[in-house]
Image (cartoon, rainbow, N blue to C red):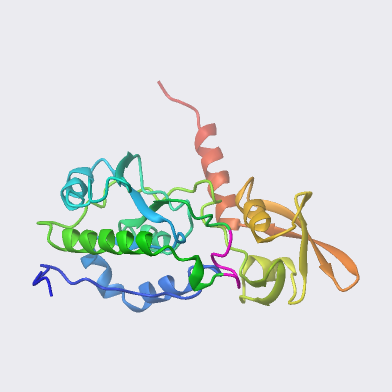
Amino acid sequence: QSGARPRRTILFQLWSGEEQGLLGSRAWIDRHPEALDGISGVFVFDGGPNAIAGIDSTAEMFDSLQKVFEPVIGLNPDLPFEIRKRDGLGAELGSDHASFLQKGIPGFFWTQDGRADWRHGIHTQFDTFDLAIPEYLEHSATVVALTALGVANLDQKLSRENLRAQRGDRGGGRRMGVFLDGVAVEELVPDSVAEKAGVQAGDVFVKIDGKAIEDRQALVAAIRDGGPVKKVVVRRGDKEVEVTFEWKDEIEAEKKKQKEEEKPVIL
């Protein structure tokens, strides 16, 4: 209706299996290797009902994003928007943008702000339509539309320099590989961290590294925080069973970093 004709193709995609290990986005990437070089940027909206409030940028792409977001800045004085210059686009939230960052493609996860308590409802069986906030949805949809059109109309693709898909405060997107009902395991993803540790369907999480697990939020926080090896206690029938979760990619990365730091300095 607006008559806008973007210079590049804009794709809208829905992926499943994010919580179980970015399964959908990784599968799409594996099936479409020929498309990866042509992608300018991937923008993931998966942070609950609050309004889009900002985005991270590397120094190399900052000028391009300023141009893209020029119509967004000041769009609504009550819902400010900020472009934050960072050393890299970390995969700290572990959502589907991380799949693309791992391939050297700019991937973004929106910052969101507002009155909604995203910890209640989102990604649970209590995630119902009444939790949506219409004015936030309208604003976020407008921001996404302007972003897609702006990136599609740039003279060049967004810079792929210094993306540095770092690990951050959510354990770099650690995944157990389980389908949950509250803190009870309904099903396991084959060859996942949980399956390798010996977790079984029907197990209920009790403790992680000594911390009691009372709800899903506590479970996510316990997995996210601390090191890549965790002692996990589950209730299986009338018994408690202890298993060990290991995120081997993180363990190997830490060993590699330690070796680099131990190398002698030649002056």
Q: Is residue 122 magenta?
A: yes
Locate residue 39: give its quadrant: bottom left
Q: Judge whether residue 84 is colored magenta.
A: no
**In the image, farthest residue toward the top:** 267
Residue 118 percent location from the top left of the image = 52, 57
**Which residues fall within the magenta stretch?**
120-126
Residue 191 placement, left or right of 45: right
Q: Quadrant of the C terminus?
A: top left
Percent x, y of residue 115: 47, 51
Is the magenta region chiefly helix, strand or loop? loop
Going by the image, does 184 lie left or right of 99? right
Residue 8 vertical placement versus 231 (above, below): below
Picture layout, residue 123 above or below residue 27: above
* Residue under the point 27% across and 68% down: 36
The residue closer to the viewer here, 223 or 230, is: 223
Give x and y (percent) for residue 126. 60, 70
* Horizontal and vertical percent position of residue 55: 33, 49
Count how many numbered circles sit on residues in the image: 0
With 33 as the anchor, is 153 left or right in this view? left
1 vs 157, nearest the viewer: 1
Residue at the spot 66% in from the left edge and 71% down from the top edge? 180
Q: Residue at x 47, y 76 (%)?
A: 16
Q: Which residue occupies 51% across, 74% down? A: 17
For residue 105, side relative to residue 152 (left or right): right
121 or 264, which lies in front?
121
